[in-house]
Structure formats: C-alpha cells, structure tokens
Amino acid sequence: MEILASLVASSIRAGTPLLFATIGEIVTEKSGVLNLGLEGIMIAGALSAFATTIATGNPWIGILAGGLAGASLAFLHAFFSVTLKANQPVTGLMIVILGLGLTSFFGRNYIGKVATYINPIDIPYLSSLPFLGEAIFRHDPLVYLAFATSIVVWFVMTKTRYGIEITAVGENPEAADTLGVNVDGIRYICTLFGGFLTGIAGAYLSLAYAKLWTDEMTAGRGWISLALVIFSGWMPQRAILGAYLFGGLDVLSFKLQAAGIGISYHLLRMIPYVATIFVLLLAVSRKKEAFGAPSALGRPYIRGKRD
Amino acid sequence: MKYTVHLASIVASMVIVGVLLISMNIDPIEAYSIMFQRSFGSKFGLTELFVKTTPIILTGLSVAIPFKAGLWNIGAEGQLYMGAFAASLVALYSKNPYLTIPLMFVFSAFLGVLWALIPGILRAKFGLNEILSTLLLNYVAIYWVEYLVYGPLKGKKVYNFPYSDLFPKYAILPRLLETRFHVGVFIAIFLAVLIYFLLTRTEFGFSIRVVGANPKAAEYAGINKDKIIIYSMMLAGALSGIAGMIEVSGIHMRLKCNISPGYGYAGIPVALLASGNPIGVVFAALLFGFLYVGGSALQTTYSIPVAIVYVFQAIIVLFIIAGDALRGRKLWKFLHH
C-alpha cells in the first residue's frame, strides 16, 4: 500500500510538467494555431527559471521568468503563424531547434550550479490521511497549480463566452470574424498563454522535479505533451488523466531499474516514447466525431480568402 | 530574387549570433574569421567541410523526398542511428574482406527503411501524424544504440568507454589525401544526382509531386496515395540509414553514442532551403557543413557548445519564411490545404 501511494505520488509529480504543457497547447490549438515548438519552449523555460532563481534567490520569480521566456518564444510563433500567415509546422520546428540551441549556448555556465528549489509542503490534516496523504497531499505548490489551472481552463473553455469565442476561432474563423470576433487577437492570446504554461512546465522541471540544469533535460516531454493533446481529444479534463498516466510511465522506467529486474536502463527509457506512439494510435483509430481536432487547426486565417 | 532573401537571411543570422557571442564576451569578427579560416584556410579544413557535409546531404534528401509528397520526416536522426547500428553489426561480425562494405550499405539502408516504414504505415493506414511518430522513434533509436554500446556490443578493448570494438580495416571506407576525407562524400553526391533524376524523370517522382501538390488530383489521376506515402518514407529511411553507415564506417570506425550532432535535424532546414530540390540540397548541405566545421572550431577556441549551429539554422529559416511572407508569395503553397 505504501509503495502504491509513493508510486501515485511520483506519477503525479512526473506528470505535472506534461500537464502544464498539454493544457497550454490545448488552448493554443483550440484557437486554430498548431504550435509544434513545445520542446524548445519548455527547455527555454527550464533554463530561464533556473538562471533567474540563481540571480534573485527567489524560485517564484524564477517560475515567472520561465513562463515569460516561454511566452516570448510563443510570441515568435504567433507572429509567424498569425501575422505572417507562415507554415505553422515549419515555424514550430524551428522554435524547437532555436530553444535547444539557445539553452545549450547560455546554459553551459549553469551546469552543476545549485539554485533555490521549490519543495513539497504537507497540507495540514490532509497530509496525515492514510494513503491519500502520501499520494496526494504532500506535493509542492506547483503540482496543485497545474491541477487548478486545468480545472480553470476546462471551466473557461466549456462554460464561458471566452471559451466559445476561442472554439469558434479554431473551428470556423470566417464565421467568427463575421460575428465580430477578433480572430488574430484571440489566436495571439491563446498562443502566448500556451507558451507561458509550457515555460512553467520547464521551470517545474529544473526547479522542482530534477532540481538541476542539464542540456536537453526536457528529453522529449514537449513532444509527449503534443501527443497528449491528441490523446485527450482537446479536453482539459482528459488531459489531467493522460498527463498523470504518462508521468507514471516515466516513473515506471526508473522504478523498474531500481528494482533490479535485469532489463537495461537504456531499454526501459524507451517506454514513454513507445507508449506515446501506441496511445496516439488508439486516439486516431477512434471514431472521427469523437476525435475533436479543431477544424481550422494549423490553417492561417486570411480575411476574404476561402480554401 | 529568391537567393537574395536566402543570402540576407544568412547575414541576418550571423548578426544575431554575433550579438549572442558579444554577450558571452566573444569578439564576433574574430569568431567568424576563425570559422572561415578553419573551413577554407587549409587542406584539412576543406576536407573536413566535405566530410561534415556528407551526412547532411543524405539527411537533407531524406527530409526532401517525403516533403515533396507533403510529408514531414523528422525521423532522419533515428533512421541514421539504426543504419549505423546495422552497419556496425555487419562490420563486427562479417569476416569477408570484399563483401563487408557492400553488405554494410545494404543492411544500413534496410534498417533505415524498416525504421521509416513504421511511421509511413501508421500514416498511410491509420492517419497517424508522421511528425510525432518519426520524432518519437528518434529517442527509441538513440536509446537502442546506447543500450548496445553499454551492453551487448560493448567492445573488449575499450576499457570502460561505451564503445564497440574498432571495425576491421576492410569495414572502413577508404580515405584520401591523408585526411578524414573518405569516399562516402562521392557516394552522397552520387545519390543526390540519382534522386534528382528519380524525382524529375520518372513516373514515381511525378506521382510523389502530384500527391504533395494536390492529393485530390492524385486520386483522380489514379495514383495510390498510400503507396506513395509508404514508398517515399522507405526511400527517406534508406538514405538516412546510409548516412549512419557512412558516419560509423568513414569517421568513427566503431559504434558509439553521439555519432550524430543533430545531422538528422539539420536535414529539415536543408530540405526547406533547397525547396526539396535534390541538387539544391547538396548546396544547402554545404552551408550547414560549413556551420558544423565552424561550430566545432568555435568550440575548441572558446569552448562554446556546437549547438550554436542550431541557432544559426533556426534563424536562417525563420528569416527566409519572413522574407517570403513579406513579399506576399507562399513558398510552400502546396502545403496549404
């Protein structure tokens, strides 16, 4: 039972960066913008947060810096996709390459450095509950922030006017424009929001999860988050489940190694990537109507032009 | 006009990277002159330039062919590693001095094909987005090679390093000019010309272009779209697989981790710069080869990571896209649905 509780706890922790990035990208994609740059945005968030924390001594300023770094790279993506109407996959891929290159360049001075980290807190009374205490109520604040953000995004997307407008822009920008919705404005905001959350995902990695900075430390989490968006059918509530599930797979590869089951660590490391492909396959083989991709996803909107 | 934008983008990338260098207290003029001097200033530099260009030609082609069919092969890196793995198996276990190198080519291409076939089939049969599947398989391939060099293929004479044993002499591509310049360079250029003819002069090439430009028209013309998707991915995998073989056989002479400093990913901007034209790929690859040689010169001089090459790559492409958009012309028209 105790082992299970700690397994749940570490799955939630490992799933938290995935959750931040997935929720952010759901909002971006709901508005019709496909941002493939998550991997580069996340790593930029990780380094900015780490460096800022060392400079200021305050990890919360670091987290904010991580979010802002993510939002700046996302702004670049929005400028190319929304204003210049450029090819979105190309821009996204270049943002990945840019993020990895810049962080490797600026990050070399931070390898082996120590920052002020964000540590778990025991929630009064609840943390002493059997099982649930260890599994759910002894995490760092960002874990709860990720969860709360998902709920808020779910609420805004499904129950408010803003959500309807975002969905309209992503489904049918021509109609939304006719109704007086600012298509480009909403796409900018949603892309920046997605970048901000993905930056925080990176900040979480360097300041709360791994508690260090290394090159390419995101290790494909940006790509896995992109897959989770599809897996979740663009629904925030399903993204929570997906992120923690994949967090669990990440943990599993470490736990299996620690248990000494005799399978090479390098082979166990493949688990999340292979599992992601299988999960994607499951997601796309569902019925079309249950699939849920925004109709205008990845298509630039040019007023007066129909295709 | 088109090349003016390309040139301007290269200059712009040098300006931006120059600013980054200044922020690290490095004189950019000095840094750039080191880059040029190392690449063009000596026989060694020039041969290195071609040596680094070789795998990028192949990965560039490997991205360009599916690109022409409207597909993204982001998996050249993984296909390269699988090719390197296959070539190493042959090199380490084949005893025949004449057949070894030909067999290494065949098997590396074969494994590259298999690795690219997975996302190809998933895309054609299940509609699974090939960007994510090709990319995720890169991680799997790289961990596979790591597993091998830490485990079953770890050499007996390598102390504690994660290397395989050195290949026998007959498994190493012949070198010329007493440098690392190997015959793989000619093979890559030959393959580029071959692919050029394949794309422009054959029915298969025509079908690829029709599927890429207008999938609906392809259907009306009776072209089997799924088949074209799968074949173009297979061809892409073969080329990247051969790139892996050339790297282990021509340069490293053994299997190890990090055989590629992102050559597979460099193939993406190379294919874009060349608009998918195989001959253009050779020249774009030469530019990136220069960046890699220059990048390692900067690494040895100032100990800044080779990843600075990534920054150049991304900025060049972003500027080309921007220039293109500002002139109101869509370079990748056929990708807009």
Image (tube, coloured by chain):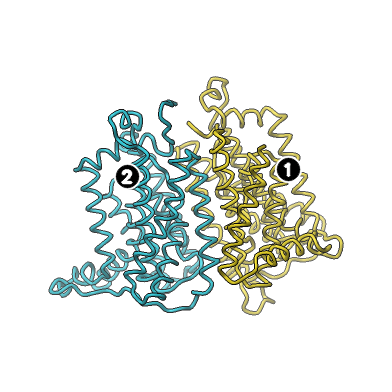
Residue on which the image places disc 1: B192
Q: Chain of mark 2?
A: A
Q: Quadrant of the N terminus of chain A?
A: bottom left
Q: Residue at x 25, y 50 (%)?
A: A153
Chain A's shade in the image? cyan
Residue A241 lies, in percent from the top left, at: 28, 54
In this view, the residue in front, B244 or B42, is B42
**What separation in Å lies between label 2 and label 1 (alpha carbons)?**
42 Å
Task: Return the mark for residue A298.
Answer: none
Q: Is residue B96 visible?
A: no
Residue B147 in which image quadrant: bottom right
Q: Chain of mark 1?
A: B
Q: Is residue A120 above or below residue A77?
A: below
Tag 2 secondary structure? loop
Residue B320 in which image quadrant: top right
Residue B169 in which image quadrant: bottom right
Chain B's shade in the image? yellow
What amino acid type is highlighted by mark number 2?
Answer: Trp
Q: Is residue A260 visible?
A: yes
In this view, the residue in front, A231 or B307, is B307
Q: Residues within 10 Å of mark 2 (few under 14, many from 20)?
A: many
What is the tally of numbered marks visible in this picture?
2
Q: Is residue B39 above or below residue A1?
A: above
Residue B247 lies, in percent from the top left, at: 70, 59
Residue B186 lies, in percent from the top left, at: 80, 50
Q: Residue at x 51, y 69 (%)?
A: A107
What amino acid type is highlighted by mark number 1?
Answer: Ala
Residue on which the image places disc 2: A234
